[in-house]
Image (tube, helix red, strand yellow):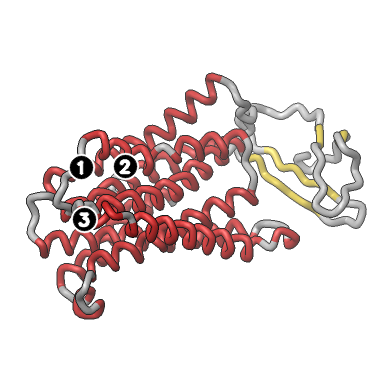
């Protein structure tokens, strides 16, 4: 501990089987708010080191911490998505070319989240012990999420009411909300685990950055609804906002109380797979019966793609 050898006890002994685990109890007089470094030496001399950037008590499940993480989830996920949903009344008055721009903007927003989530997930996967095969876990979880949402989307579109009642945009909006919700679950994990690991400054920066980041997600959800013949009710808009935003709360709980690097990789991968499937859905929705090359190479679409990436890049800088 802090460059000094210190006595400790191990709940399940000091000899661990493959993939085994134990809890080390170190009676060390740590100082609240200070930085401490823990290094564990194995019998072969291999060292495992961890830095506690700001020493604080680990959050434990209680009414106080549940309330704190719930408030963080509302602030980071639910409220920003709800703000984005407020754009819907204005979307219904826009021309077809402007709607093409906004749908392409949505693809740009989600495309950035796709790349960002893949980068975070693969980075987390690389830190897992080799036994967990982190990269393979990430690929399989992402592929599974993509296949599951693709199946759900096909089932929804195959329902007799899906196209006949002019609500194809509603189906797409639900799928986008699900994809964003899975991504926001990963954001909640990052925030909760930052506080659980004593990295309060990082957690605060993540809250500010993700809040700005997520204000554009509500717009991505409601953009497909502008082309529907039947307008969504207020209750339906609220449900979309909850699907996209509430997982942030669950992620903060999981990250703060039961953080696991393995589950973190799995959930980040699910978010990536879901967003990839949603991007494909939006592109199919935009193209329709037209030639994909002709539709996607138009000025409004290209401008929307660039604008979407640019907006997420700028807001994402604050989350870094």
Quadrant of the frame with the N terminus: top right
Using residue 241 as the reference point, say whether residue 121 is left or right of it. right
Badge 3 density bin: few <14, some 14–19, many ≥20, Cα 10 Å: few
> Mark 3: which secondary structure?
helix
Q: Do the numbered discs 1 and 2 sit on residues whose CB atoms are within 8 Å?
A: yes
Using residue 114 as the reference point, say whether residue 254 is left or right of it. right
Q: Earlier in the sequence, mark 3 or mark 1?
A: 3
Rendered residue at 34%/59% (across/down)? 158
| Residue labelled with disc 1 | 232
Rendered residue at 54%/25% (across/down)? 65
Outermost front residue: 160
Say which of 271 and 33 sits in front: 271
| Residue labelled with disc 2 | 240
As displayed, is residue 180 above or below residue 284? above
Q: Nearer the viewer, mark 2 or mark 3?
A: 3
| Residue labelled with disc 3 | 164
> Mark 2: which secondary structure?
helix
Badge 1 density bin: few <14, some 14–19, many ≥20, Cα 10 Å: some
Using residue 136 as the reference point, say whether residue 168 is left or right of it. left
Q: Earlier in the sequence, mark 1 or mark 2?
A: 1
Q: Position of residue 294 (x, y in %)?
A: 19, 79
Rendered residue at 21%/64% (across/down)? 304
Is residue 313 visible to the viewer in this orientation of the structure?
Answer: no
Q: Marks 1 and 2, Cα distance to the nearest angstrom? A: 10 Å
Q: Position of residue 101 (x, y in %)?
A: 18, 63
Q: Position of residue 150 (x, y in %)?
A: 42, 61
Badge 2 density bin: few <14, some 14–19, many ≥20, Cα 10 Å: many
Q: Marks 2 and 3, Cα distance to the nearest angstrom? A: 22 Å
């Amino acid at each position: 501990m802090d460059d000094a050898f210190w006595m400790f006890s191990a709940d399940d002994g000091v000899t661990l089987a493959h993939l085994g685990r134990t809890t080390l109890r170190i009676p060390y007089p740590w100082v609240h708010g200070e930085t401490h470094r823990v290094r564990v030496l194995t019998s072969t001399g291999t060292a495992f080191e961890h830095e506690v950037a700001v020493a604080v008590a680990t959050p434990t499940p209680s009414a106080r911490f549940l309330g704190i993480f719930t408030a963080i989830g509302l602030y980071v996920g639910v409220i920003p998505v709800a703000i984005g949903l407020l754009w819907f009344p204005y979307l219904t008055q826009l021309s077809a070319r402007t709607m093409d721009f906004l749908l392409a903007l949505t693809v740009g927003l989600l495309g950035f989240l796709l790349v960002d989530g893949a980068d975070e997930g693969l980075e987390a996967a690389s830190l897992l012990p080799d036994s967990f095969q982190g990269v393979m876990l990430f690929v399989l979880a992402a592929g599974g999420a993509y296949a599951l949402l693709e199946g759900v989307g096909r089932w929804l579109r195959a329902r007799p009411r899906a196209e006949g009642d002019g609500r194809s945009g509603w189906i797409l909006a639900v799928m986008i909300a699900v994809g964003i919700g899975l991504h926001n679950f990963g954001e909640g994990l990052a925030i909760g685990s930052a506080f659980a690991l004593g990295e309060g400054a990082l957690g605060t920066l993540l809250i500010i950055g993700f809040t700005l980041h997520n204000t554009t997600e509500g717009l991505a959800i409601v953009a497909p609804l502008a082309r529907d013949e039947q307008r969504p009710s207020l209750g339906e808009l609220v449900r979309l906002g909850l699907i996209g935003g509430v997982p942030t709360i669950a992620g903060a709980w999981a990250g703060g109380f039961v953080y696991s690097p393995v589950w973190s990789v799995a959930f980040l991968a699910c978010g990536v797979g879901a967003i990839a499937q949603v991007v494909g859905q939006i592109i199919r929705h935009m193209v329709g019966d037209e030639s994909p090359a002709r539709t996607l190479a138009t000025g409004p679409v290209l401008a929307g793609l660039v604008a979407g990436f640019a907006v997420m890049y700028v807001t994402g800088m604050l989350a870094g």
